Image (cartoon, grey):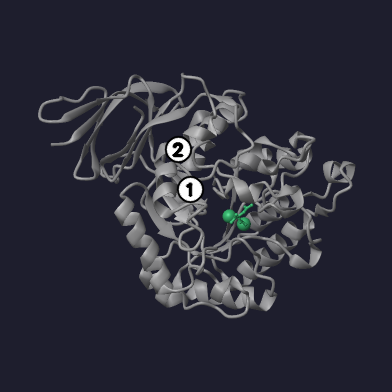
Amino acid sequence: MGIILGNGKLINQEGKLTPAEILVEDGRITAIGESISREGHEWVDCKGSMISAGLVDVHVHLREPGFEQKETVATGAAAAVRGGFTTIACMPNTRPSIDSVETVTYILDKAKEAGLARVIPYGAITVRQLGKELTDFAALKEAGIFALTDDGVGVQSTAMMKKAMRAAQELGISIVAHCEDDDLLIPGAALHDGVVAARHGLPGIPSESESIHVGRDILLAEQTGVHYHVCHISAKESVRLVRDGKRAGVHVTCEVTPHHLLLCDEDIPENLDTNWKMNPPLRSREDRAALIAGLKDGTIDMIATDHAPHTAEEKANGMDRAPFGIVGLETAFPLLYTHLVETGELTLQKLVELLTVKPAQAFGLPYGRLEVGAPADLTVIDLETEKAIDPTTFASKGINTPFSGWACKGWPILTLVNGKIVYQEV
Ligand SMILES: NC(=O)N[C@@H](CC(=O)O)C(=O)O
Ligand SMILES: [Zn+2]
Ligand SMILES: [Zn+2]
Protein backbone atom coordinates (compact mmCIF):
# COMPACT_ATOMS: atom_id res chain seq x y z
CA MET A 1 0.00 0.00 0.00
CA GLY A 2 1.28 3.42 -0.94
CA ILE A 3 0.39 6.97 -0.01
CA ILE A 4 -1.20 9.34 -2.52
CA LEU A 5 -0.62 13.03 -1.99
CA GLY A 6 -3.93 14.05 -3.53
CA ASN A 7 -5.38 17.38 -4.59
CA GLY A 8 -2.00 19.07 -4.75
CA LYS A 9 -0.28 21.42 -7.17
CA LEU A 10 3.11 21.30 -8.86
CA ILE A 11 5.13 24.07 -10.50
CA ASN A 12 5.29 23.34 -14.23
CA GLN A 13 8.00 24.29 -16.75
CA GLU A 14 6.53 27.78 -17.11
CA GLY A 15 6.54 28.28 -13.35
CA LYS A 16 2.75 28.01 -13.08
CA LEU A 17 1.04 25.90 -10.40
CA THR A 18 -1.02 23.10 -11.94
CA PRO A 19 -3.14 20.36 -10.27
CA ALA A 20 -1.22 17.18 -9.53
CA GLU A 21 -1.12 14.07 -7.35
CA ILE A 22 1.85 12.00 -6.30
CA LEU A 23 2.05 8.31 -5.43
CA VAL A 24 4.67 7.23 -2.95
CA GLU A 25 5.58 3.55 -2.47
CA ASP A 26 8.47 1.90 -0.60
CA GLY A 27 10.17 5.21 0.04
CA ARG A 28 10.15 6.36 -3.59
CA ILE A 29 7.99 8.48 -5.85
CA THR A 30 6.35 5.95 -8.20
CA ALA A 31 3.82 8.10 -10.08
CA ILE A 32 3.05 11.73 -10.76
CA GLY A 33 -0.23 12.59 -12.52
CA GLU A 34 -3.26 14.80 -12.58
CA SER A 35 -5.34 12.15 -10.86
CA ILE A 36 -4.14 8.78 -9.51
CA SER A 37 -6.47 5.86 -8.75
CA ARG A 38 -6.96 5.65 -4.99
CA GLU A 39 -7.48 1.92 -4.99
CA GLY A 40 -5.40 0.16 -2.36
CA HIS A 41 -3.64 3.34 -1.26
CA GLU A 42 -3.88 5.76 1.62
CA TRP A 43 -5.07 9.16 0.35
CA VAL A 44 -3.88 12.41 1.93
CA ASP A 45 -5.62 15.66 1.02
CA CYS A 46 -3.15 18.43 0.15
CA LYS A 47 -6.08 20.87 -0.07
CA GLY A 48 -4.79 22.56 -3.21
CA SER A 49 -1.37 23.32 -1.72
CA MET A 50 1.95 23.16 -3.55
CA ILE A 51 3.92 19.91 -3.40
CA SER A 52 7.66 20.44 -3.54
CA ALA A 53 10.70 18.24 -3.24
CA GLY A 54 11.74 18.23 0.41
CA LEU A 55 13.91 21.21 1.32
CA VAL A 56 17.64 20.66 1.84
CA ASP A 57 19.62 22.76 4.35
CA VAL A 58 23.41 22.42 4.31
CA HIS A 59 23.94 24.63 7.37
CA VAL A 60 22.32 23.67 10.68
CA HIS A 61 23.56 23.64 14.28
CA LEU A 62 22.03 20.75 16.22
CA ARG A 63 24.19 21.31 19.34
CA GLU A 64 24.38 17.64 20.33
CA PRO A 65 26.58 16.34 21.86
CA GLY A 66 27.42 18.86 24.56
CA PHE A 67 24.89 21.68 24.34
CA GLU A 68 21.60 19.82 24.70
CA GLN A 69 20.11 22.78 26.58
CA LYS A 70 20.20 24.71 23.25
CA GLU A 71 19.00 21.91 20.92
CA THR A 72 19.24 18.15 20.43
CA VAL A 73 19.36 16.10 17.26
CA ALA A 74 15.71 15.15 17.94
CA THR A 75 14.42 18.70 18.57
CA GLY A 76 16.43 20.08 15.66
CA ALA A 77 15.17 17.36 13.33
CA ALA A 78 11.60 18.09 14.50
CA ALA A 79 12.14 21.79 13.72
CA ALA A 80 13.50 20.81 10.31
CA VAL A 81 10.49 18.78 9.20
CA ARG A 82 8.12 21.42 10.61
CA GLY A 83 9.92 23.90 8.35
CA GLY A 84 9.66 21.58 5.34
CA PHE A 85 13.33 20.48 5.45
CA THR A 86 13.88 16.78 4.80
CA THR A 87 17.69 16.74 4.70
CA ILE A 88 19.91 18.79 7.00
CA ALA A 89 23.69 18.85 7.35
CA CYS A 90 24.76 19.58 10.93
CA MET A 91 27.77 21.59 11.96
CA PRO A 92 30.69 20.21 14.01
CA ASN A 93 30.95 22.93 16.69
CA THR A 94 29.55 20.62 19.38
CA ARG A 95 31.37 19.33 22.51
CA PRO A 96 33.19 17.19 21.66
CA SER A 97 33.34 18.63 18.18
CA ILE A 98 32.59 16.26 15.30
CA ASP A 99 36.24 15.37 14.74
CA SER A 100 36.07 11.61 15.32
CA VAL A 101 34.28 8.57 13.93
CA GLU A 102 32.65 8.07 17.36
CA THR A 103 30.94 11.45 17.30
CA VAL A 104 29.79 11.06 13.69
CA THR A 105 28.29 7.68 14.60
CA TYR A 106 26.72 9.10 17.78
CA ILE A 107 24.87 11.77 15.78
CA LEU A 108 23.80 9.36 13.03
CA ASP A 109 22.39 7.05 15.74
CA LYS A 110 20.50 9.92 17.40
CA ALA A 111 19.07 10.95 14.02
CA LYS A 112 17.94 7.41 13.29
CA GLU A 113 16.29 7.22 16.70
CA ALA A 114 14.44 10.48 16.05
CA GLY A 115 13.28 9.17 12.65
CA LEU A 116 12.42 12.63 11.30
CA ALA A 117 14.72 14.48 8.88
CA ARG A 118 17.74 12.94 7.20
CA VAL A 119 20.70 14.27 9.21
CA ILE A 120 24.19 14.25 7.71
CA PRO A 121 26.97 15.46 10.03
CA TYR A 122 29.86 17.61 8.86
CA GLY A 123 33.30 16.54 10.01
CA ALA A 124 35.68 19.11 11.48
CA ILE A 125 38.67 20.13 9.33
CA THR A 126 40.94 20.40 12.35
CA VAL A 127 41.06 18.51 15.65
CA ARG A 128 38.74 20.25 18.18
CA GLN A 129 38.43 22.97 15.53
CA LEU A 130 41.61 24.50 16.92
CA GLY A 131 43.23 24.99 13.52
CA LYS A 132 46.41 23.13 14.47
CA GLU A 133 46.10 19.58 13.16
CA LEU A 134 43.95 17.99 10.43
CA THR A 135 41.39 15.38 11.44
CA ASP A 136 41.43 11.92 9.82
CA PHE A 137 39.53 12.79 6.64
CA ALA A 138 39.48 9.23 5.26
CA ALA A 139 38.06 7.80 8.49
CA LEU A 140 35.45 10.57 8.74
CA LYS A 141 34.43 9.99 5.14
CA GLU A 142 34.06 6.30 5.82
CA ALA A 143 31.89 7.12 8.86
CA GLY A 144 29.50 9.06 6.64
CA ILE A 145 30.23 12.79 6.87
CA PHE A 146 28.59 15.26 4.51
CA ALA A 147 31.68 17.47 4.00
CA LEU A 148 34.44 19.12 6.04
CA THR A 149 34.19 22.45 7.88
CA ASP A 150 35.34 24.21 11.03
CA ASP A 151 32.17 26.35 11.05
CA GLY A 152 31.96 28.57 14.10
CA VAL A 153 35.54 29.65 13.45
CA GLY A 154 37.68 30.35 10.42
CA VAL A 155 40.75 28.29 9.55
CA GLN A 156 43.33 30.97 10.37
CA SER A 157 46.45 29.41 8.86
CA THR A 158 46.70 29.64 5.07
CA ALA A 159 49.08 26.68 5.03
CA MET A 160 46.65 24.58 7.08
CA MET A 161 43.80 25.44 4.70
CA LYS A 162 45.91 24.51 1.69
CA LYS A 163 46.89 21.21 3.28
CA ALA A 164 43.22 20.51 4.10
CA MET A 165 42.13 21.27 0.53
CA ARG A 166 44.81 19.00 -0.95
CA ALA A 167 43.79 16.09 1.28
CA ALA A 168 40.06 16.68 0.76
CA GLN A 169 40.47 16.88 -3.01
CA GLU A 170 42.23 13.51 -3.08
CA LEU A 171 39.31 11.93 -1.23
CA GLY A 172 36.61 13.77 -3.17
CA ILE A 173 35.29 15.66 -0.10
CA SER A 174 34.14 19.30 -0.18
CA ILE A 175 35.75 21.98 1.99
CA VAL A 176 33.15 24.30 3.51
CA ALA A 177 34.40 27.50 5.08
CA HIS A 178 33.29 29.90 7.76
CA CYS A 179 35.29 32.85 6.43
CA GLU A 180 36.61 35.01 9.22
CA ASP A 181 40.09 36.42 9.74
CA ASP A 182 40.57 36.77 13.50
CA ASP A 183 43.36 39.30 12.97
CA LEU A 184 40.76 41.87 11.98
CA LEU A 185 38.39 41.29 14.90
CA ILE A 186 37.91 43.56 17.89
CA PRO A 187 36.86 41.69 21.06
CA GLY A 188 33.20 42.35 21.89
CA ALA A 189 32.31 43.59 18.40
CA ALA A 190 28.83 42.33 17.51
CA LEU A 191 27.54 44.51 14.67
CA HIS A 192 28.73 45.21 11.14
CA ASP A 193 31.39 47.92 11.03
CA GLY A 194 29.08 50.50 9.49
CA VAL A 195 26.67 53.33 10.21
CA VAL A 196 24.68 51.56 12.92
CA ALA A 197 27.66 50.41 15.01
CA ALA A 198 29.09 53.93 14.66
CA ARG A 199 25.83 55.55 15.81
CA HIS A 200 25.88 53.40 18.94
CA GLY A 201 29.59 54.06 19.50
CA LEU A 202 30.31 50.32 19.21
CA PRO A 203 33.26 48.54 17.61
CA GLY A 204 32.29 46.80 14.36
CA ILE A 205 33.04 43.59 12.45
CA PRO A 206 34.55 44.68 9.12
CA SER A 207 33.53 43.11 5.81
CA GLU A 208 37.19 42.32 5.06
CA SER A 209 37.30 39.89 7.98
CA GLU A 210 35.10 37.72 5.75
CA SER A 211 36.17 38.64 2.22
CA ILE A 212 39.92 38.21 2.83
CA HIS A 213 39.33 34.54 3.62
CA VAL A 214 36.99 34.17 0.63
CA GLY A 215 39.67 35.57 -1.69
CA ARG A 216 42.47 33.55 -0.09
CA ASP A 217 40.51 30.32 -0.26
CA ILE A 218 39.37 30.77 -3.87
CA LEU A 219 43.05 31.08 -4.86
CA LEU A 220 43.84 27.93 -2.86
CA ALA A 221 40.88 26.10 -4.41
CA GLU A 222 42.17 27.06 -7.83
CA GLN A 223 45.56 25.55 -6.95
CA THR A 224 44.23 22.37 -5.36
CA GLY A 225 41.15 21.73 -7.50
CA VAL A 226 38.96 21.02 -4.47
CA HIS A 227 35.23 21.83 -4.34
CA TYR A 228 35.24 24.87 -2.05
CA HIS A 229 32.01 26.22 -0.53
CA VAL A 230 31.57 29.50 1.35
CA CYS A 231 29.20 29.52 4.34
CA HIS A 232 26.74 32.34 5.04
CA ILE A 233 28.14 34.88 2.56
CA SER A 234 27.33 38.41 3.75
CA ALA A 235 29.60 41.06 2.21
CA LYS A 236 29.37 42.51 -1.29
CA GLU A 237 33.13 42.07 -1.79
CA SER A 238 32.78 38.33 -1.06
CA VAL A 239 30.03 38.05 -3.68
CA ARG A 240 32.30 39.77 -6.21
CA LEU A 241 35.17 37.39 -5.41
CA VAL A 242 32.96 34.30 -5.84
CA ARG A 243 31.63 35.70 -9.14
CA ASP A 244 35.20 36.23 -10.39
CA GLY A 245 36.26 32.80 -9.14
CA LYS A 246 33.44 31.10 -11.02
CA ARG A 247 34.31 33.02 -14.18
CA ALA A 248 37.90 31.83 -13.84
CA GLY A 249 36.68 28.23 -13.66
CA VAL A 250 37.35 27.62 -9.97
CA HIS A 251 35.04 25.02 -8.37
CA VAL A 252 33.53 27.43 -5.85
CA THR A 253 29.97 27.55 -4.52
CA CYS A 254 28.34 29.58 -1.76
CA GLU A 255 25.23 29.91 0.36
CA VAL A 256 23.32 32.86 1.78
CA THR A 257 20.96 32.89 4.79
CA PRO A 258 17.38 34.15 4.81
CA HIS A 259 18.31 36.83 7.38
CA HIS A 260 21.10 38.29 5.28
CA LEU A 261 18.71 38.42 2.32
CA LEU A 262 15.89 40.11 4.23
CA LEU A 263 17.59 42.34 6.80
CA CYS A 264 20.40 44.87 7.06
CA ASP A 265 22.10 46.65 9.96
CA GLU A 266 19.71 49.61 9.69
CA ASP A 267 16.83 47.30 10.69
CA ILE A 268 18.39 46.48 14.09
CA PRO A 269 16.18 47.99 16.81
CA GLU A 270 17.54 50.86 18.90
CA ASN A 271 17.42 48.71 22.04
CA LEU A 272 19.96 46.33 20.43
CA ASP A 273 17.86 43.20 20.97
CA THR A 274 20.34 40.28 20.87
CA ASN A 275 18.02 38.29 18.59
CA TRP A 276 19.64 40.48 15.94
CA LYS A 277 23.15 39.30 16.82
CA MET A 278 24.59 36.69 14.51
CA ASN A 279 27.84 35.90 12.74
CA PRO A 280 28.42 37.20 10.16
CA PRO A 281 26.48 40.28 11.22
CA LEU A 282 23.68 41.91 9.24
CA ARG A 283 25.64 44.15 6.91
CA SER A 284 24.76 47.34 5.04
CA ARG A 285 21.84 47.99 2.74
CA GLU A 286 24.27 47.79 -0.25
CA ASP A 287 25.57 44.41 0.91
CA ARG A 288 22.02 43.10 1.11
CA ALA A 289 21.34 44.33 -2.43
CA ALA A 290 24.52 42.60 -3.65
CA LEU A 291 23.36 39.32 -2.08
CA ILE A 292 20.02 39.49 -3.90
CA ALA A 293 21.82 40.35 -7.16
CA GLY A 294 24.17 37.40 -6.55
CA LEU A 295 21.22 35.07 -6.10
CA LYS A 296 19.64 36.30 -9.31
CA ASP A 297 22.75 35.94 -11.49
CA GLY A 298 23.70 32.52 -10.09
CA THR A 299 26.81 33.65 -8.19
CA ILE A 300 25.10 32.51 -5.00
CA ASP A 301 24.14 28.86 -5.42
CA MET A 302 21.74 28.17 -2.59
CA ILE A 303 19.99 29.35 0.55
CA ALA A 304 20.93 27.76 3.90
CA THR A 305 19.51 28.76 7.28
CA ASP A 306 22.52 28.67 9.65
CA HIS A 307 19.95 27.58 12.26
CA ALA A 308 21.83 28.50 15.46
CA PRO A 309 19.74 27.98 18.60
CA HIS A 310 20.86 29.46 21.93
CA THR A 311 19.07 29.61 25.28
CA ALA A 312 17.10 32.68 26.34
CA GLU A 313 19.45 33.04 29.35
CA GLU A 314 22.51 33.22 27.09
CA LYS A 315 20.79 35.67 24.76
CA ALA A 316 19.91 37.90 27.76
CA ASN A 317 23.58 38.81 28.20
CA GLY A 318 23.58 42.03 26.18
CA MET A 319 24.88 42.79 22.69
CA ASP A 320 28.56 42.47 23.60
CA ARG A 321 28.34 39.18 25.56
CA ALA A 322 25.39 37.21 24.14
CA PRO A 323 26.35 34.39 21.74
CA PHE A 324 26.08 34.95 17.99
CA GLY A 325 23.28 33.13 16.16
CA ILE A 326 19.57 32.90 15.40
CA VAL A 327 17.24 30.01 14.62
CA GLY A 328 15.98 29.55 11.07
CA LEU A 329 14.53 26.15 10.20
CA GLU A 330 10.89 26.92 11.02
CA THR A 331 10.72 30.35 9.41
CA ALA A 332 12.89 30.10 6.26
CA PHE A 333 10.30 29.18 3.65
CA PRO A 334 7.46 31.47 4.83
CA LEU A 335 9.85 34.42 5.17
CA LEU A 336 11.45 33.94 1.77
CA TYR A 337 8.16 33.26 0.02
CA THR A 338 6.47 36.30 1.54
CA HIS A 339 9.36 38.75 1.29
CA LEU A 340 11.12 37.69 -1.93
CA VAL A 341 8.52 35.87 -4.05
CA GLU A 342 5.36 37.80 -3.23
CA THR A 343 7.31 41.04 -3.61
CA GLY A 344 8.47 40.00 -7.09
CA GLU A 345 12.21 39.75 -6.35
CA LEU A 346 12.41 35.98 -7.09
CA THR A 347 10.09 33.53 -8.80
CA LEU A 348 8.60 30.70 -6.75
CA GLN A 349 10.35 28.20 -9.01
CA LYS A 350 13.73 29.82 -8.36
CA LEU A 351 13.15 29.93 -4.59
CA VAL A 352 12.27 26.24 -4.55
CA GLU A 353 15.37 25.39 -6.61
CA LEU A 354 17.61 27.37 -4.23
CA LEU A 355 16.28 25.28 -1.33
CA THR A 356 16.20 21.86 -3.02
CA VAL A 357 17.99 20.82 -6.19
CA LYS A 358 20.70 23.48 -6.04
CA PRO A 359 22.20 22.49 -2.66
CA ALA A 360 21.75 18.79 -3.51
CA GLN A 361 23.51 19.21 -6.85
CA ALA A 362 26.41 21.23 -5.43
CA PHE A 363 27.20 18.45 -2.95
CA GLY A 364 26.22 15.45 -5.07
CA LEU A 365 23.25 14.42 -2.89
CA PRO A 366 20.50 12.27 -4.47
CA TYR A 367 17.75 14.46 -2.93
CA GLY A 368 15.96 17.68 -3.83
CA ARG A 369 14.27 16.36 -6.99
CA LEU A 370 10.60 15.69 -7.51
CA GLU A 371 10.52 12.95 -10.15
CA VAL A 372 9.47 9.34 -10.55
CA GLY A 373 12.12 7.10 -9.02
CA ALA A 374 13.48 9.76 -6.66
CA PRO A 375 13.46 9.24 -2.87
CA ALA A 376 10.04 10.32 -1.54
CA ASP A 377 11.25 13.36 0.41
CA LEU A 378 8.37 15.78 -0.08
CA THR A 379 6.98 18.95 1.41
CA VAL A 380 3.48 20.33 1.00
CA ILE A 381 3.33 24.09 1.39
CA ASP A 382 0.23 26.25 1.92
CA LEU A 383 0.83 29.43 -0.07
CA GLU A 384 -2.47 31.07 0.94
CA THR A 385 -2.93 31.13 4.71
CA GLU A 386 -1.31 34.11 6.42
CA LYS A 387 0.01 33.61 9.95
CA ALA A 388 2.38 35.51 12.20
CA ILE A 389 5.68 33.89 13.22
CA ASP A 390 5.23 32.73 16.80
CA PRO A 391 8.38 31.36 18.48
CA THR A 392 6.27 29.80 21.27
CA THR A 393 5.05 27.26 18.69
CA PHE A 394 8.57 26.22 17.55
CA ALA A 395 9.65 22.58 17.76
CA SER A 396 13.19 23.89 18.19
CA LYS A 397 14.41 24.62 21.71
CA GLY A 398 15.65 27.95 20.37
CA ILE A 399 13.32 30.91 20.19
CA ASN A 400 16.07 33.38 19.24
CA THR A 401 14.68 35.00 16.12
CA PRO A 402 14.40 38.63 15.00
CA PHE A 403 11.32 37.70 12.94
CA SER A 404 8.85 37.17 15.78
CA GLY A 405 5.45 38.58 14.81
CA TRP A 406 6.20 38.85 11.07
CA ALA A 407 3.09 37.95 9.06
CA CYS A 408 3.88 35.31 6.42
CA LYS A 409 2.35 32.99 3.87
CA GLY A 410 4.01 29.80 2.65
CA TRP A 411 3.70 27.49 5.65
CA PRO A 412 4.72 23.82 5.32
CA ILE A 413 1.73 21.65 6.30
CA LEU A 414 2.94 18.12 5.51
CA THR A 415 6.43 16.63 5.26
CA LEU A 416 7.48 13.16 4.12
CA VAL A 417 10.94 11.70 4.47
CA ASN A 418 11.72 8.50 2.62
CA GLY A 419 7.99 7.98 1.99
CA LYS A 420 7.00 8.35 5.65
CA ILE A 421 4.87 11.20 6.99
CA VAL A 422 7.06 12.92 9.60
CA TYR A 423 5.12 16.16 10.01
CA GLN A 424 1.48 16.94 9.49
CA GLU A 425 -0.12 20.15 10.65
CA VAL A 426 -2.96 19.21 12.99
N1 LIG B 1 26.14 31.90 12.93
C1 LIG B 1 26.21 32.18 14.20
O1 LIG B 1 25.97 33.33 14.57
N2 LIG B 1 26.54 31.27 15.13
C2 LIG B 1 26.89 29.91 14.90
C3 LIG B 1 28.30 29.76 14.43
C4 LIG B 1 28.52 30.01 12.97
O2 LIG B 1 27.68 29.70 12.11
O3 LIG B 1 29.59 30.52 12.62
C5 LIG B 1 26.70 29.13 16.20
O4 LIG B 1 27.21 28.03 16.33
O5 LIG B 1 25.96 29.62 17.07
ZN1 LIG C 1 29.81 30.22 10.56
ZN1 LIG D 1 26.88 28.13 11.35
Circle 1 is placed at which residue position? 57
Q: Establish if 349 lies above or below 105.
A: above
In the picture, measured across the screen, residue 99 lies left or right of residue 220, that is: left
The answer to whether residue 52 shows anywhere in this view is: yes
Residue drawn at 19 percent across, 25 percent down: 36
Circle 1 Cα neighbour tier, 10 Å, few/some/many (<14 / 14–19 / ≥20): many
Circle 2 is placed at which residue position? 83
Query: What is the quadrant of the N terminus in the image?
Result: top left
Q: Establish if 305 lies above or below 65.
A: above
Asked which secondary structure carries label 1, the reply is strand
- Identity, as a three-letter code, of the amino acid under mark 1: Asp
Q: Position of residue 6 (x, y in %)?
A: 26, 24
Res 152 quadrant in image: bottom right
Q: Establish if 223 lies above or below 72.
A: below
Query: Outermost residue toward the bottom?
Result: 133
In the picture, measured across the screen, residue 244 lies left or right of residue 85, that is: right
Q: Position of residue 248 (x, y in %)?
A: 65, 59
Query: What is the quadrant of the C terminus in the image?
Result: top left
Q: Position of residue 15 (x, y in %)?
A: 46, 27
Residue drawn at 45 percent across, 26 percent down: 14
Q: Position of residue 224 (x, y in %)?
A: 58, 73
